[in-house]
Amino acid sequence: GAVVSQHPSWVICKSGTSVKIECRSLDFQATTMFWYRQFPKQSLMLMATSNEGSKATYEQGVEKDKFLINHASLTLSTLTVTSAHPEDSSFYICSAYPSGRLSYEQYFGPGTRLTVT
Amino acid sequence: TQLLEQSPQFLSIQEGENLTVYCNSSSVFSSLQWYRQEPGEGPVLLVTVVTGGEVKKLKRLTFQFGDARKDSSLHITAAQPGDTGLYLCAGGRGNTGKLIFGQGTTLQVKP
């Protein structure tokens, strides 16, 4: 149990276009999901907290208009990178926090490799 | 300011050696989790510790949570090449589910 999927697993797009990444909890409901960014051989950097039915909470320094987050259901959150530029190229990872569970454990998706040319 | 200081950040050892990774903070955490991540994949949860002084064992891996819940360690006995990867500690605070990650330790075990 506790499986999180991400789609696509990798994407290449041209500068100026937008890219949508999906994060799904497959066998549990998640009121809260998190989006991270990771550079090679570095740790995870939290970008935003996605809450079902409400606005996402962004970490300091993360542009909310550039990284649009929508958490439309208890099993799906999406991250849209708008007007992508080469510096947005990175590994994006989501995680889901099971609803109603008295635990601090998050379950991570396999990540999405974004390359902007 | 890094809330969770993880050390060492890089470690290259021979198969069969033992190693310890440390995760330290001046802040108290409700829980401390350890993850292992392979290149191109998401982190996989190894263990969660929540009680000060708690020790958990997972085969050759031993995890400890400090008495004051500010620090943790991961000890690997007789490391194997399959242990190679990025090890991440992450602290949880409150009930938001939000985790604070350490810088990560890249471990390479040579055969």
Image (cartoon, rainbow, N blue to C red):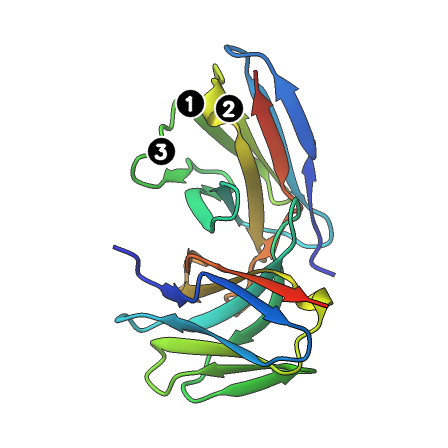
Q: Which mark is residue A81?
A: 2
Residue at 52% across, 32% down: A70
Q: Position of residue A69 (x, y in %)?
A: 49, 31
Marks 1 and 3, how far apart at CA: 8 Å
Q: Position of residue A104 (x, y in %)?
A: 50, 66
* Label 3 sits on residue: A62
* Label 1 sits on residue: A66
Marks 2 and 1, how far apart at CA: 6 Å
The residue nearer to you, when weighing B77 against A35, is: B77
Q: Disc 1 sits on a residue from what chain?
A: A
Residue at 42% across, 23% down: A66
The quadrant the C terminus of chain A occupies is: top right
Q: Is residue A98 above or below residue B67?
A: above
Which amino acid type corresponds to the residue marked 1 in the rendered image? Lys
Mark 2 or mark 1: whose residue is earlier in sequence: 1
Q: Is residue A100 visible?
A: no
Mark 2 or mark 3: whose residue is earlier in sequence: 3
Element under label 2?
strand
